[in-house]
Amino acid sequence: MKSISLKDIAIALNLSKTTVSYVMNNRGDEKRVSKETQDRIKQYAQTHSYKPNQLARSLSLGKSNMIGLIVPNISDSFFAQIARRIEKKAEKLGYNVVFSSTGESPERESKIIQSMLDRQVDGLIIVSSEKNHDDILKLKKGNFPFVIVGRKYTDIETNVVALEDKDGVTSAVELLIDNGRKYIGFITISLELDSIKDRLKGYKQALKNKNISYNPNVVKHVTYNDVEASLKEAMNELVYQEKVDGIVFATHYLAEEGLRLLKLNNINVPEEVAIVSFGKDRGFDLFDPPLTSVDFPIIEMGDTAVDLLLDAIENKVVATKNIIMKTKLDIKQSCGSI
């Protein structure tokens, strides 16, 4: 069946094309089109399977009803989960989501931002490398709607939805200390991100709270582009040289690989080394032993990011709200509490 146009509907109902356009673009009430006429137009459109011309619609409204989502790695379980939530929330509100991954490359992030703008997205949700100040400033100065998620630009006032990184790690370390662990290592990732730095601050804060001296020898920075090899080296140093009895991992993927290495080397968890992960993968409960984690409110983060962005889009202003989400411990066997 050939699709009908606004003009076809107008002719069939003896109405102007403009009136039909107002109704089909949900502006009937605004333009004082009677409810009876609106119902006639919508009923005819539905009966004859009317499909809007999205390009023409975006040109007439000055909107594409698309938002861009830029993440470091869409295959990472955290980013995949938050992307699904953002897509679901946006779809309910009439928006499509365009995805792209940066691989934590500032250069690629810059190119993707420009590509998204060229595609005329109405706004951006960005999990940024935190190294693209120029691009972020351009978006801000141009009053282009955007939200930074999970990361921060401390020197730029922007819409942010982030986590209590410091407090989350502090709670993880204190849990191990309260379970009797005396010598706790911390494995983090070598990325110059404020969120990653805050996690190290959280580790140090927990030691301070418990009157334990900080030892830099048990803090290991794993190379982002060579996780497997550098994590193996870090684990060997902590377990065999420093002989730690607990480890907190700054990301879920470090914890997954860390547990695998411990089991491979016949190190009993949690009897010999107790572990906690900052962040959770869906498979954590199936691991042996199940992994204790600091959990994130992913649904709330995704929904809040979309709400902030659409508020900026609809109101034509870039409001600045800094929303910090609380984390919570999900205690399983790996920490020695159970």
Image (cartoon, rainbow, N blue to C red):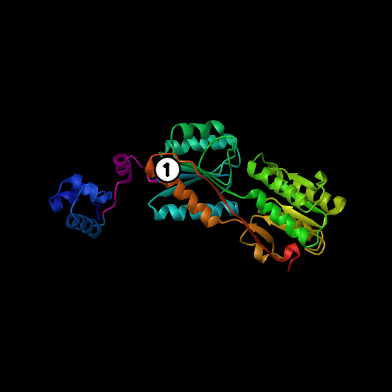
Q: Quadrant of the C terminus?
A: bottom right
Quadrant of the image occupied by residue 297? bottom right
Residue 280, visible in the rendered structure? no
Kindly identify the amino acid type of the residue bearing the numbered disc 1.
Ala
Horizontal side of residue 50 vs 79, given as left or right: left
Horizontal side of residue 253 vs 52, given as left or right: right
Give the image location of residue 263, x and y in percent. Answer: 78, 61
> Label 1's element?
helix
* Residue position for label 1: 312
Does the magenta segment cover residue 153?
no
Considering every residue shown, the one lying at the far right of the view is: 241
Q: Residue at x 61, y 61 (%)?
A: 282
Q: Residue at x 73, y 59 (%)?
A: 175
Give the image location of residue 157, x and y in percent. Answer: 53, 37
Give the image location of residue 16, x and y in percent. Answer: 16, 46
Horizontal side of residue 33 vs 201, given as left or right: left
As displayed, is residue 203 above or below residue 193? below
Quadrant of the image occupied by residue 43? bottom left
| Magenta-highlighted residues | 50-65
Q: 275 or 264, which is in the foreground?
A: 275
Q: Quadrant of the N terminus?
A: bottom left
Does the magenta segment cover residue 58?
yes
Number of marks in picture: 1
For disc 1, the neighbor class at 10 Å (few under 14, some 14 to 19, many from 20) is many
Q: 7 or 248, which is in the foreground?
A: 248
Considering every residue shown, the one lying at the far bottom of the view is: 338
Q: Residue at x 82, y 46 (%)?
A: 215
Residue 77, visible in the rendered structure? yes
As displayed, is residue 1 above or below residue 151? below
Give the image location of residue 178, x and y in percent. Answer: 77, 61
